[in-house]
Image: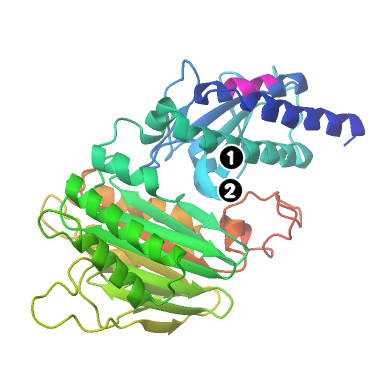
Amino acid sequence: MTQAEEAAWAGVLAQVVDRSHLATGEQLSSVVDAAVRALGLTAELLLVDLAEQVLTPIGREPGPPVDVVGTLPGRAYQHAEILAGTDEHGRVLWVPLLDGTDRVGVLRIGLGAGGTVEDGPWLRRRLWTLSGLMGHVVMAKVPHSDRLRRWRSNGPLSPPAELLWHILPPRTFATERVVVSALLQPAREVAGDAYDYDVREDVVELAVFDALGHDIRAGLTTVSALTAVRNARRDGVRDLAAVADRADAFIGSQPGPLQFATAVLARFDTTTGVLHYLLAGHPPPLLLRRSKIVKELVAPPRLPLGVAGLAASAPAPRATVAREQLEPGDRLLLYSDGITEARDAHGEFFGEQRLIELTEHAAAADLSAPETLRRLGAAVMEHQQGRLQDDATLLLVDWFAAGHLRIFPTLPGHEEDLDGRRGPEPGGGGGR
């Protein structure tokens, strides 16, 4: 590594930042490609769809999509690893593309005509930095680009799905203490399900919603529930029962027939491991410890959001907020009944036992939280021959000091992870 090489890479990053300000979404591949050409490299961005099934090259004339399953770029996406390969243009590197810790796609780097650029740890570290920058830039352009949105949805979204995806937080967020990851299916037709989370210092707020129905009214009910919960949270309301009361009042104030949503509301302290949670007519969360589901978090449930307190007689009883002590390394899985009640062609449910077995298998394989959910979602879709009859939501919390390392690439044979911190102990593999 010479000063000239460092200066050249600094110039690449500066050029990408400067030119990205005025670039449209479909121009971003050209922007990064032009920047790395001076180093003898080529570049192309591939964006993953909401269902995490295909990676689509983005550009004015994009190429055909690439499957996430069964391909080298798909493997780089799944395992968050920089992988070397070849294509019709020569030697290439596939670099995971992340917006923070949310998986966005992959970056294809061509190593020059005839593979003239040497692959190695130094180059991979710089490419990881470049990929991180492009992940942020791409997602910053999505709200202003219908074309990027369409590539990301892999087709048109239904109006309820458009409404929900517009307000949901990123599918994955991580700190050095905790990883929160979510999945929502069917991505293009979801109506009544949603998830939410908020991370502030040492506290993580969690929520999963499932509204009555599968149409725009269900979507509006879910949006109302989510908005009321966020509003209460931002007003400083910390009592989960009081938060649920806010949602009751807001949903109940809307005109038209009675609407409601089941929900799980939870608050997790990443310092103490204490979890407080409230069930509003929703399936209980599952607690995973040392790769085994050890219990359902069952508490006396309240009525669904929008129903409690509307009875003409006595007010609904005060909701029970339960407490659970988690241990380091635990995983917490929240889900909606669209997962367990998914039916195959013979009417057989996907079932809680199948969900438990697949979750345990993913933990034993040391998969990252987002990859665990991608595989669970794929299994549910396969069980129903690719067509869900109901919305399905998963929200996974990974309380593990090295959980974020499963999301980032590592350099084999080196002590440090690409973000400069020490990587997993030998044999741990960071989940890859």
Q: Is residue 195 left or right of residue 365?
A: left
Locate residue 69, reporting x and y percent. 42, 40
| Main secondary structure type of the part rendered in magenta | helix
Q: How many marks overall? A: 2
State which tag comes first along the sequence, 2 or 1. Answer: 2
Q: Residue at x 70, y 23 (%)?
A: 35
Contact (CB < 8 A) between labels 2 and 1? yes
- Residue designated by label 2: 100
Q: CA distance from mark 2 to mark 1?
A: 7 Å
Which residue type does callout 2 highlight?
Gly
Give the residues in magenta.
29-34
Locate residue 359, reporting x and y percent. 38, 64
- Residue designated by label 1: 136
Locate residue 195, reporting x and y percent. 36, 57
Q: Is residue 113 left or right of residue 166?
A: right
Label 1 sits on a secondary structure element that is helix
